[in-house]
Image (cartoon, rainbow, N blue to C red):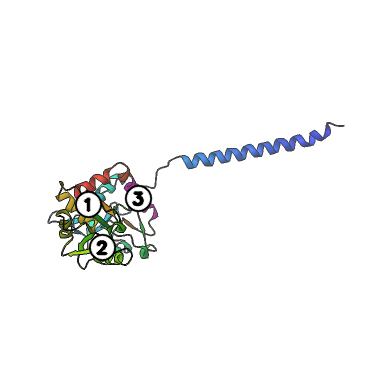
């Protein structure tokens, strides 16, 4: 009589073990499925016109400039490198800067690569890739007296372009920290000249002006430190998520293997 309960319990126990094993198998299948790297959608889905159409304003050296025969610049090389990674033919569509977003919205281009600042007011209409360049303000100072933040400027002389955004930026800092001397100049290059020649302790200029100046003066040892960010990214229309993923992945691979850094060295 004592063995009868086991006749009832044993089938229930076996059923529970079976369900547990099936659940475990299902969980392992899901883990394995998610860990397998599967190919993305065909390129004809990502770029339905059979090519990657890139909107660019080729009037902004060194990022893009047009000649009678071709386009040249950092953004041009970047577009070509991305298209090569994705495996698509490439066509640049040169237009005015003000028309770039409209061209993207009207499906005249697939992406925009044109020293495009990330604009939070447009995130309902476009997807931005990760940034590929920071054009923010930098402090350039002498190696024997490095000034790395705006807080370091108190009691020193700061050179900048008169009437520029750098001028506004410097004046805002005059209200935040103990005073520093202001040395306005006609051009960013003149502000940098002032530091190199000992007429100022640091220059506040955009990163592009600083990089080009330091490239032209390779013997001048001058540290450059960012004090603000202005990030350039590639834009894709909001409803082209798979295209954005492919472009973003290609850009990430260019960063990871040093190709983007090489493009930067070529132009800046």
Where residue 115 sits, quadrant-wise, is: bottom left
Numbered mark located on residue 74 in the image: 1
State the separation of the CA atoms marked 1 and 3.
17 Å
Q: Earlier in the sequence, mark 1 or mark 3?
A: 1
Q: Is residue 18 above or below residue 267?
A: above
Residue where numbered disc 2 is placed? 180
Looking at the image, the residue that sits furthest to the left is 68
Residue 39 can be seen, yes or no = yes
What element does badge 1 sit on?
A: helix
Q: Secondary structure at mark 3?
A: helix
Residue situated in front as seen by the camera: 222 or 217: 222
**Residue 63 seen in render:** no
Q: Position of residue 168 (x, y in %)?
A: 26, 67
Q: Position of residue 212 (x, y in %)?
A: 18, 53
User: Quadrant of the image for the N terminus?
Assistant: top right
Neighbourhood count class around disc 3 (C-alpha, 10 Å): few under 14, some 14–19, many 20 upward: many
Nearer to us: label 3 or label 2: 2
User: Which mark is first along the chain, 2 or 3?
Assistant: 2
Callout in the foreground (1, 3) = 1
Q: Which residues are magenta?
A: 240-252
Q: Measured from the top left, where is residue 44 in percent x and y?
A: 34, 50
What main secondary structure does the magenta stretch of the protein show? helix
Would you say residue 112 sits in the magenta stretch?
Answer: no
User: Do the CB atoms of the residues marked 1 and 3 lie less than 8 Å apart?
Assistant: no
Q: Position of residue 64 (x, y in %)?
A: 20, 56
């Amino acid at each position: 009589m004592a063995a009868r309960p086991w006749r009832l319990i044993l089938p229930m126990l076996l059923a529970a073990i079976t369900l547990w094993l099936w659940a475990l198998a299902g969980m392992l299948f899901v883990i394995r499925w998610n860990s397998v790297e599967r190919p993305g959608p065909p390129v004809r889905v990502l770029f339905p016109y059979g090519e990657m159409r890139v909107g660019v304003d080729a009037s902004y050296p060194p990022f893009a400039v047009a000649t009678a025969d071709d386009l040249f610049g950092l953004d041009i090389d970047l577009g070509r490198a991305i298209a090569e990674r994705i495996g698509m033919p490439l066509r640049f569509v040169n237009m005015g800067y003000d028309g770039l977003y409209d061209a993207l919205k009207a499906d005249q281009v697939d992406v925009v690569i044109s020293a495009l600042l990330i604009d939070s007011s447009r995130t309902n209409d476009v997807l931005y890739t990760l940034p590929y360049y920071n054009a923010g303000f930098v402090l350039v100072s002498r190696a024997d007296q490095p000034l790395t933040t705006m807080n370091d400027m108190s009691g020193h002389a700061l050179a900048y372009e008169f009437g520029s955004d750098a001028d506004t930026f410097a004046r805002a800092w005059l209200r935040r920290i103990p005073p520093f001397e202001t040395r306005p100049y006609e051009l960013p290059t003149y502000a940098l000249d002032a530091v190199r020649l000992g007429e100022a302790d640091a220059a506040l200029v955009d990163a592009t002006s600083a990089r080009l100046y330091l490239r032209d003066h390779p013997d001048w040892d001058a540290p450059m430190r960012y004090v603000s960010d202005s990030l350039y990214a590639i834009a894709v229309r909001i409803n082209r998520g798979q295209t954005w993923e492919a472009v973003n992945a290609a850009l990430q691979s260019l960063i990871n293997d040093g190709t983007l850094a090489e493009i930067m060295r070529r132009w800046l």
